Amino acid sequence: MDRDKILLTPGPLTTTLRTKLAMLKDWGSWDAEFNAVTARVRHGLLDILHAGESHVLVPLQGSGTFSVEAAVATLVPHDGHVLVLDNGAYCKRAARLTTLMGRWASSLLFDESQPVDPQALEQFLRDDPSVTHVLLVHCETGAGVLNPLQEVADVCARFQVGLIVDAMSSFGALPIDARSTRFDALVAASGKCLEGVPGMGFVLIRKEVLAACEGRSQSLSMDLFDQHAYMEKTGQWRFTPPTHVVVALAEAMAQFEQEGGQSARLARYTRNCETLLAGMQALGLKPFLDPAVQAPIIVTFHAPMLPGYDFKTFYAAVRARGFLLYPGKLTQIETFRVGCIGAIGENEITQAVHAIGLALQELKNS
């Protein structure tokens, strides 16, 4: 097969040729031209959420999880109490990193097939006034559930607790408006719905919140207060930046705007998701989630009912036909996941369904 394999994953994901070509030039990390790209990216990311008046944008080297950890360490006081709304694997990761940062973490547990419940959050905050921050994963891609960001934000505002949002798999695709949705920090990354390449996370932080965070982080490299202060003073990153990732993201963001921004991206991903669900159900594969709570980002499917089914064998058979799937994240039942995001459309999804059908037939005959 001549083309690159299509990545049906929640990031890294398939990128355009334009985005790939942007990485063919070397950049000086302190050079004025590169600093201008960084500034353009920072302002552009704020604009996507209409957050330029209320928030600052702090980029950070590394995967998105680096930035979630940095946000917790920078925003939460050492005696703070973080309540994680937990309906999946990435929520559990957030709780674990909070504990490793030396902060007190509690988890409010929900079924992984259901969104978190704002009313349960409200009751918890009434019962435990020690909570200082709530951490919400907007789109929990462990199963693909869309969580109710606006309703959670409204509860947090009423109780005057900080809200940290992991918007890793929603930023740029699902609607978020900082003018109407109040959050202290929102975390996302380059290699998700913006369709850049992995290697850079970023955090939108409310200006007055960041102003009180000096000296709070116990990490040198992941101190978002220091990262922001240095960037504002010099225009530069404190430590070696992921130069090729930054310029690829700038190019991906230009294409994002040309496509029509968030609403157009959501429309394409929604068509991808609908095409995927219809095709997979025609193959006899059942989605894990009820359609009412399914985000058009990644879809979890029950494993095919085949004797001796093994995901690695199934994965290899689909991969041989040009498509990369994602393993399941659920602990109690066997599943696999198929992403709807990236620089792909209905044609690629239809081809992927065909490849999955051929792989299933191969496994039946083996």
Image: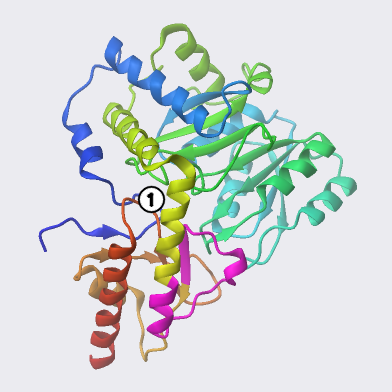
Q: Is residue 92 left or right of residue 334?
A: right
Residue 33: give x, y in percent of width and height.
28, 14
Q: Considering only vertical position in the picture, is 313 above or below 118?
A: below
Residue 307: give x, y in percent of width and height.
37, 91
Q: Inspect this view and state whether residue 328 appears.
A: no
Q: Is residue 327 left or right of residue 94?
A: left
Q: Amino acid at mark 1?
A: Gly
The image quarter containing residue 10 is bottom left
Residue drawn at x 61%, y 20% is 53
Q: How many marks?
A: 1
Q: Is residue 26 left or right of residue 7?
A: left
Q: Considering only vertical position in the picture, is 117 above or below 255?
A: below
Q: Inspect this view and state whether residue 334 appears.
A: yes
Q: State the residue in front, 6 or 29.
A: 6
Image quadrant where one finds the C terminus: bottom left
Residue 324: give x, y in percent of width and height.
29, 63
Crowding near the residue tagged with mark 1, few <14, some 14–19, many ≥20 C-alpha atoms within 10 Å: many
**Residue identifier under label 1:** 11
Image quadrant where one finds the N terminus: bottom left
Q: Secondary structure at mark 1?
A: loop
Q: State the residue in front, 144 or 266.
A: 266
The image quarter containing residue 360 is bottom left
Residue positioned most to the right: 127
Q: State the residue in front, 175 or 237.
A: 175
* Residue 64: in magenta span: no
Residue drawn at x 48%, y 80% is 286
Q: Considering only vertical position in the picture, is 329 above or below 34?
A: below
Residue positioned most to the left: 2
Residue 212: give x, y in percent of width and height.
68, 18
Residue drawn at x 26%, y 30% is 244
Magenta highlight range: 277-300
